[in-house]
Image (cartoon, rainbow, N blue to C red):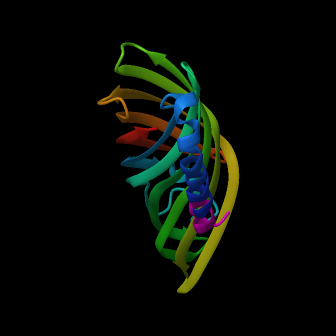
Amino acid sequence: MNCVKTAVACIAFASSLATAAPALAQATQGRVFFGVSAGSTDIDSGITDGLINPGSGTVDGKDSGYKFYGGFQFHKHFAGEIAYVDLGQLTYQGNFGLQPVTNGRINVSGLNFAVLGIVPLSESFSVFGKLGFFAWEADGRDVTGGIPFQQVTEGADISFGIGLRLDVTKNVSLRLEAESFNINSDAATMFSGGVMVRF
């Protein structure tokens, strides 16, 4: 999956919802939603396996990331959501065999499809959990033994998270979330905050 393609797919999805929103407004009573969030991310160092010798050099998986999403709340307690997620960049250096590895970086992004379970605690405040799958791409680049190297891997794995939603007005909400995205046998976490608009 190419990152550009994932972004285009998410934009197309959002556009289709926007086109349908006027016709659905009366029936859904503000259940179509869009949002954007940003925050801190942490990608497991195990994602560098096969790129550097285990334990050699340094790996830094902490970065910032963002996502934009759209969805439909089809029940008071349930919603479906699709999001384009950019988990930022992990950097690394070390050795591969006897060769030095420098300027290593892995960018992770993809599409996340999730079902949300929502528990209203008051008229304006609710908590939610989410479970889905993450169609991801990891684009790794470095210089090994003086030669530029690139490796792109992709897959689809489980994702899950929890969050809080505060309704500021009838159509605008604030969301705080903690999410985990599996990447093969490793994982990336994202703690984010953002704004959601309902139609």
- Give how far across and how far down residue 97 sits, in percent: 62, 71
Residue closest to the eye, 35 or 111: 35
Residue 10 vs 189, above or below: the answer is below
- Give how far across and how far down residue 31 sits, in percent: 52, 31
Residue drawn at the location 54% of the way across and 49% of the way down: 18
The magenta span reads: 1-7
- In this rendering, would 31 be left or right of 120? right
Residue drawn at the location 61% of the way across and 36% of the way down: 114
Residue drawn at the location 58% of the way across and 75% of the way down: 98
Outermost residue on the top side: it is: 121
- Give how far across and how far down residue 178 sits, in percent: 43, 35
Which secondary structure is most common in the magenta stretch? Answer: helix
Residue 86 vs 147, above or below: the answer is above
Residue 43 shows in this picture: no
- In this rendering, would 187 be left or right of 195? right
Where is residue 167, by image quadrant?
A: top left
- Give how far across and how far down residue 8 sits, in percent: 59, 63
Residue 109 shows in this picture: yes
